[in-house]
Image (cartoon, rainbow, N blue to C red):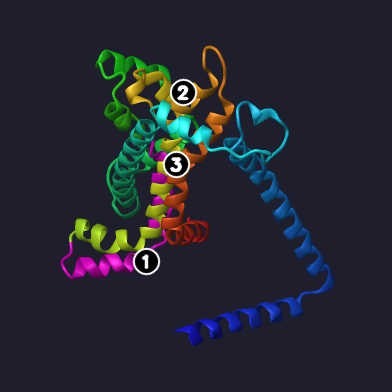
Amino acid sequence: MEYASVKAQSQRLARRSQYRERLKPHEKVSLWISRLIIWAVIIVMMFPVAWVVGASFAPGDAFFSGAIFPSHITFENYTTVLKKTNFLLWVKNSMILSVGVATIQLFLTATSAYAFSRMKFAGRKNGLKTLLILQMFPTFMALPAIYGIMAKLNLLDNLYALMLVMAGSSAFSIWLLKGYIDSLPKELDEAALVDGATHWQIFTKIILPLATPMLVVIFLFSFMGVYSEFILSSAVLKSPENYTIALGLQRFITNQFSAHWTQFAAASVMASLPLVILFMVLQRYLQAGLAAGAVKG
């Protein structure tokens, strides 16, 4: 195994050197300019992250000291957030809401995309046009209607009612997955139908396994969107025990007497850990799904 790994790495290096040798002088210059631009963009994007991480270890109000990394490192902000706030409860509520919405959206997206891609039924074209039109409007435009309906049904300040509302915004995901399913050979469906398979069997045993990378991308994007959502949650959730992580973080900087920016930074760092872990676990599927979407979508 070790020999095979070394051999594969040497082959990659050989191909890379051959590629560089084939480049013309102006192409090499363009390549280096592109690399410099990419690194510049990465540095600009990482600067706020480094600032927040550094501020999370800073004492007191050193958030505005001007230095990225504090001269004196302390874990007081982390202990204060964990011991004197409901941070873990906020994370728990956000995880319940995010996983629930992502799971429901994944089911609705997969079944709807398969139906629009493989089945012919009345209203199919109008349904696709409706999905396209819905993508043009942000979700918060429906906030007054959503709030009024939930208030009339006595569903305000209910985490699970909010989950059902958020799960309905699947138009973009349906379009994305439909484009991917359209690229899959229909001969697979026809062969399965000849063997006596039903549409449900084709969907579960052929389409879903082939679309796994794209399904992971949809789940991850849905999870991220719900995990950081603020506008709808702030309008619907009122009780502190139902706060999500976004609502809880706001309390650090909207305190009646003072804003605790260093504690806000520490809470932000800890709040990002679930997303980082999820990215690391699903990285292989994420890369495959994005590549497939770029080529086939």
Nearer the N terminus, badge 1 or badge 3? 1
Q: Secondary structure at mark 1?
A: loop
Q: Is residue 193 magenta?
A: yes
Nearer the N terminus, badge 2 or badge 1? 2
The dot on residue 201 is none
Tell me which amino acid carries mark 3: Met
Q: Residues within 10 Å of mark 1 (few under 14, many from 20)?
A: few
Tell me which amino acid carries mark 2: Met
How far apart are the two marked residues, 2 and 3, measured between alpha carbons? 20 Å
The dot on residue 141 is 2
**Circle 1 is placed at which residue position?**
185
Q: Is residue 129 visible?
A: no
Frontmost residue, 80 versus 212: 80
How far apart are the two marked residues, 1 and 3, measured between alpha carbons? 31 Å
Residue 272: percent from left, percent from top: 48, 42
Q: Is residue 67 magenta?
A: no
Image position of 18 with respect to 155: above or below: below
Tell me which amino acid carries mark 1: Pro
How far apart are the two marked residues, 2 and 1, measured between alpha carbons? 39 Å
Closer to viewer: mark 2 or mark 1: 2
**Magenta residues, start to end:** 168-197
Image position of 114 with respect to 156: above or below: below
**Circle 3 is placed at which residue position?**
224
